[in-house]
Image (cartoon, grey):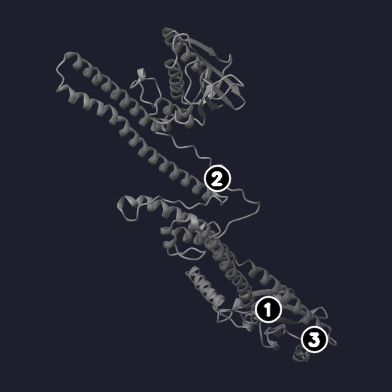
Amino acid sequence: MTASPRLAMDNQRPKKKGGEVLLGEDWVSPESVPDDQRDARPRGGLVALNRSPLARKIIIFNLMALVVLVAGVLFLNPFRDSLVVSREAGLVREAQLIADVFEAHGEGPGTGFDYGAVLASVELGPGVEAFVFDPAGAVVATRTGPDGTAGGRARSTVITDFLNMVWDGVSVVLSLGRQEAAGVDGVTLAREVFPAAREGRTASNTGHDPEGGTLFSVATPVVSGGELAAVVALTSAAGEIDALVRYEREQILQVFVVALLVSIGLSLVLASTIANPLSDLAAAAEIGRDRDGGKVSPGRVRIPDLAARPDEIGRLSVAMRGMVAALYDRIDANEQFAADVAHEIKNPLASLRSAVGSMRFVKKEEHREKLLDVIEHDVRRLDRLVSDISNASRLDSELVKEEEEEFDLVRTLANLTQYLGQQAGEKGVDFITDLPPGKIAINGLEARLAQVFVNLITNAISFCDKGDAVRVWARQRENRVLVVVEDTGPGIPEQALTKIFRRFYSDRPETHFGNNSGLGLSISKQIVEAHGGVIWAENIRQPGVDPNSEPLGARFVVGLPV
């Protein structure tokens, strides 16, 4: 089995220009979306709210903040206080001006003074009631300003009228349990501030008319000859303050409606950039899950390619595509491995069947001994083959489960070469090591990498005869380390250089037939590549000689990242 290549996710994502943002359906690549998903997905750039809980949550959460903000502004009503203060100051100035007019008119107010004529000459604001009281509190003159209030400036709409109605209903609910004061008219409210004005100071008061409108009254004394001659009282139009507040509220609600529509639109766009691709990714994953139940036609699961998105969804798409690709590579490798195993096991089984069948007809003892040798050889071959196959089949899962640790590669090689050097010496093969004096620290699975070097060294020793030599050396080059195993054996046939790392491939002399499963170099390649390294084989030749000449030996090179 071969390990799936590591995913270089950063290299799979195309570079984007600065400031470029993908919205709506910009991420969709027609050839990358599976047909099953493209047919089932709603058309258009925005999401269907009835199909996307995520889109509904995004819109609701965005609107909640806006609604709370507007409700807080309306509930706190900061502009009402400022309007009351402003209107109070305006009525106070207006009342003082009218009092000044009375004091400056002729000889000044007194007995027989025509307050009504003077009051008629004064211009009053819309809806303002003016009262003139004598020192005893009797009304001696009254006048009302022209019709019309500030409420005429309010330009209401159907939407804001509806929102105002809702707000009034909420206000009624919030005001439950409060006792409303009885309504009063303008003259009654003016009489309430008369005592304070009679004492020589300007006073003001607020109240409500029988219909609930807000009234505002101001009273100021008229002094003539150092004595109180009269009191001028002004009362604002009924509901004038309420009309001004309503007008301001209308402006806020109109802005709120616009902000609401903009927020919904932006939320839909945001939701489409999140919910649509996630929906397609989920649909692709569900298709792969449901295939076990036979709900869809067989075929490879195609994850949408969203690598162009510079966000987490793009990363998720790249990761899912890499995972699916790795799974299919693993499936293909397993299928190929099963086919190779079946093929390799058939050979010794066929030989065993032939030998066992021949035993029934052989009469001579020497022939029976030869057949028993063949049977014993094939059984050992099957046992070795099954053991190697078992180790190879477990290797993938073990490489994933085991934790990588930092270790000293020089120390590992030194321990291995010390042991394997004795094995080479017993065969009469010179064993040479050339390792750097310092430490070379790498991250990986020490036991598995040691298995690679054992395979390479024992393989080199097996091809050498007495008088040959095996050399193991290592060098560090910047961000990588090279471990080289050389021998002076017969070398590698040129046609085998591209096949030598294949499973079950073996090119050995007749005398070695059946002694190797052909999985050693394949396993070594799998382990090295799982560590992000490379491994290759080549023949050793003198520089400048004919490439077709006999090699001086074979060389295996392992490159590992440091």
Badge 3 marks a residue whose secondary structure is: loop
Q: In this picture, is 178 found above or below 466?
A: below
Q: Quadrant of residue 229?
A: bottom right
Residue drawn at point x = 47 percent, y = 65 percent? 43
Badge 1 marks a residue whose secondary structure is: helix
| First in sequence: mark 1 vs mark 3 | 3
Residue drawn at point x = 58 percent, y = 50 percent? 310
Disc 3 marks which amino acid? Pro
Q: Is residue 546 toward the left or the right of residue 36 in the image?
A: right
**Real-space Cα distance between discs 3 and 2?**
96 Å
Residue 395 coordinates in the image, percent (x, y): 39, 30
Instruction: Work out whether residue 200 can be spotted.
Output: yes
**Real-space Cα distance between discs 1 and 3?**
18 Å
| Residue that badge 1 annotates | 194
**Label 3 crowding class (10 Å Cα cut-off): few <14, some 14-19, many 20+?**
many
| Residue that badge 2 annotates | 12
Q: Quick one: quadrant of the C terminus?
A: top right
